[in-house]
Image (cartoon, rainbow, N blue to C red):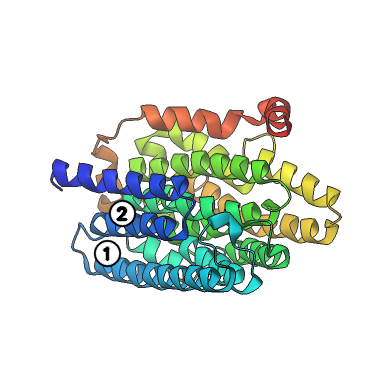
């Protein structure tokens, strides 16, 4: 892609998200979300592969439906309450519609079906943008809406953690596994949103760091399915030794960074008298942990058959810069000891 066009599209992505962040009016927030969608579509379709075009079309239709619902709900809110302010969405009907529209935008269960299909059709770089940056603007709006719809948020959160764990069990495609991982992590964030927005933001930040590391590892190894992971030990032995830590951090095992948000969320849910919800969420984390362990096993404990097709990719050195991966991997593995200071920052 022409660098000028790429720079323009990335600027559009940044501007759309910033506009949604800065807006207090529903119409302006909607415009920011639309700019975001329109800026990423050429990035998704740039390879002109039938799968990429199909994924782009699915993404566009889903986002257009969510944006139309959001616009309709905000007009309804203005009609019922006379307010266009984002924080004045007090009527339950438009408030519920807006929450569901934003849930569709970020891919929360039961409105998640588009996300694995779309991510499967994209390359890993665009998939990374879709899994991280594109979640920011809708999340900013959900954060501002959060005092209402407490039951709806808990239902969406629990369904997402369960569907995210269950859906990834039978997958062999890495991008689909990462999509279900994204759904499960978003579920954890939505569960705690109304009780502690600061823990939600912490969870979002750690999810971004861990997902960034995972996508970069797969990009460095040029792997898109589980079988391709088995060749990575010859290409990058040190990275292959570290990758199970990244995957288990995504699964939320101590003593890795991914345990911190899950620990704080379960603690806060229990404090709020929602022990059954916390138990269900913790059990759903076991489902996710299974497919992360499966990836770790495929990567470190299996050896690819030594035929010509297996040996070809080993000889090609990667041109990708490894500094971002080194920084994000360190953060993915080592941040758990900072939990007391982070908790102090959150509560202050």
Q: Which image quadrant for residue 48?
A: bottom left
Residue located 49% across and 32% down the image: 329
Q: Decide which of 301, 64 is in the foreground and name it.
A: 64
Determine crowd level at label 1: few under 14, some 14-19, many 20+ residues with C-alpha closer than 10 A: many
Above or below: residue 177 compared with residue 247: below
Image height of 84 relative to 310, above or below = below
Mark 2 neighbour class, 10 Å CA radius: few under 14, some 14 to 19, many 20 or more = some
For disc 2, the marked residue is 123
Residue at left 67%, top 42%? 199
Left or right of 150, for residue 4: left
Residue carrying label 1 = 52
On screen, residue 22 versus residue 36, left or right, reads right
Label 1 residue SS: helix
Q: In this view, does 249 lie to the left or right of 327?
A: right
Image quadrant containing the C terminus: top right
Q: Which mark sits nearer the N-terminus, 1 or 2?
A: 1
Residue 109 position in % (x across, y down): 57, 68
């Amino acid at each position: 892609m022409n660098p000028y066009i790429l720079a323009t599209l990335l600027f559009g992505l940044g501007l759309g998200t910033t506009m949604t962040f800065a807006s207090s009016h529903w119409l302006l927030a909607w415009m920011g979300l639309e700019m975001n969608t329109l800026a990423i579509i050429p990035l998704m379709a740039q390879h002109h592969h039938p799968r990429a075009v199909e994924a782009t079309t699915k993404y566009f239709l889903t986002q257009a439906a969510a944006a139309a619902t959001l616009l309709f709900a905000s007009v309804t809110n203005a009609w019922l309450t006379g307010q266009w302010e984002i924080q004045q969405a007090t009527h339950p009907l438009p408030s519920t519609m807006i929450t569901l529209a934003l849930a569709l935008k970020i891919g929360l269960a039961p409105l998640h079906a588009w996300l694995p299909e779309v991510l499967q059709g994209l390359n890993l770089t665009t998939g990374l943008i879709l899994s991280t940056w594109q979640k920011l603007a809708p999340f900013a709006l959900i954060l501002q809406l959060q005092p209402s719809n407490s039951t709806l948020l808990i239902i969406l959160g629990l369904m997402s953690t369960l569907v995210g764990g269950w859906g990834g069990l039978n997958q062999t495609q890495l991008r689909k596994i990462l999509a279900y991982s994204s759904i499960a992590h978003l579920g954890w964030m939505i569960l705690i949103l109304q009780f502690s927005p600061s823990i939600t933001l912490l969870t979002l930040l750690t999810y971004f760091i861990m997902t960034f590391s995972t996508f970069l590892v797969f990009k460095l190894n040029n792997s898109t399915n589980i079988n391709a992971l088995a060749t990575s030990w010859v290409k990058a032995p040190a990275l292959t030794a570290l990758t199970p830590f990244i995957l288990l951090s995504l699964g939320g095992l101590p003593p890795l960074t991914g345990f911190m948000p899950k620990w704080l969320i379960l603690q806060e849910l229990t404090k709020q008298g929602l022990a059954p919800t916390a138990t269900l969420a913790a059990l759903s984390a076991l489902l996710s942990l299974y497919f992360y362990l499966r990836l770790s096993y495929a990567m470190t404990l299996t050896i690819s058959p030594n035929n010509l097709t297996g040996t070809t990719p080993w000889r090609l050195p990667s041109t990708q810069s490894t500094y971002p991966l080194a920084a994000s991997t360190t953060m993915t593995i080592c941040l758990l000891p900072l939990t007391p200071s982070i908790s102090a920052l959150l509560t202050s």
